[in-house]
Image (spheres, rainbow, N blue to C red):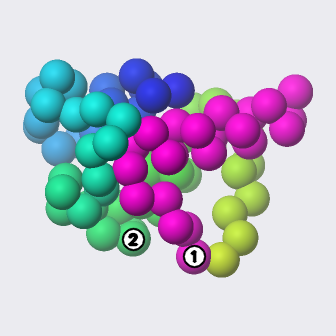
Amino acid sequence: MYDRIRTYLSEQLDIPVEEMDRDTTFESLHLDSLDMVEMIMDMEEELGVDFEMDGEMKLETIGELADFIDDKMAEIE
């Protein structure tokens, strides 16, 4: 999932994938909460699942988002 998120962000933000790693913050990429919600919705659509987001997201890095999605996918399987 980590590589998919980096690819998605690279395409959306026109930033080379190589410039992002697990510790890259969404703040450093200038993403706001609306951008995050849109990205999660796109991932849900692509994967065909609902991540059931409760409350405000506290995910700050690409790695945290990848782990979150991996955990949600494991719960579904």
Q: How far from the left and from the top, in percent, is residue 66?
A: 52, 37
Kindly identify which residue carries mark 2.
33
Write down the region rendered in magenta.
Answer: 56-77
Kindly identify the residue that appears in the image at 85 percent across and 38 percent down: 75
Kindly identify which residue carries mark 1.
56
Marks 2,1: beta carbons within 8 A: yes
Left or right: 35 in relation to 2: left
Task: Find numbered disc 2 in the image and state the secondary structure of the residue it sits on.
Answer: helix
Q: Which residue lies furthest to the front in this view?
A: 23
Kindly identify the residue that appears in the image at 30 percent across and 69 percent down: 32
Q: Is residue 11 magenta?
A: no
Query: Mark 2 vs mark 1: which is more N-terminal?
Result: 2
Q: Residue furthest bottom?
A: 55
Question: Mark 1 packing: few (<14 Cα in 10 Å), some, or many (20+)?
Answer: few
Q: Which amino acid does label 1 sit on?
A: Glu
Q: Which amino acid does label 2 sit on?
A: Ser
Can the viewer see residue 45?
A: no
Name the quadrant containing residue 2: top left
Q: Is residue 49 above or below residue 59?
A: above
Can the viewer see residue 76?
A: yes
Q: How far from the left and from the top, in percent, is residue 35?
A: 35, 61
Q: Is the magenta stretch mostly helix, strand or loop?
A: helix
Left or right: 53 in relation to 45: right
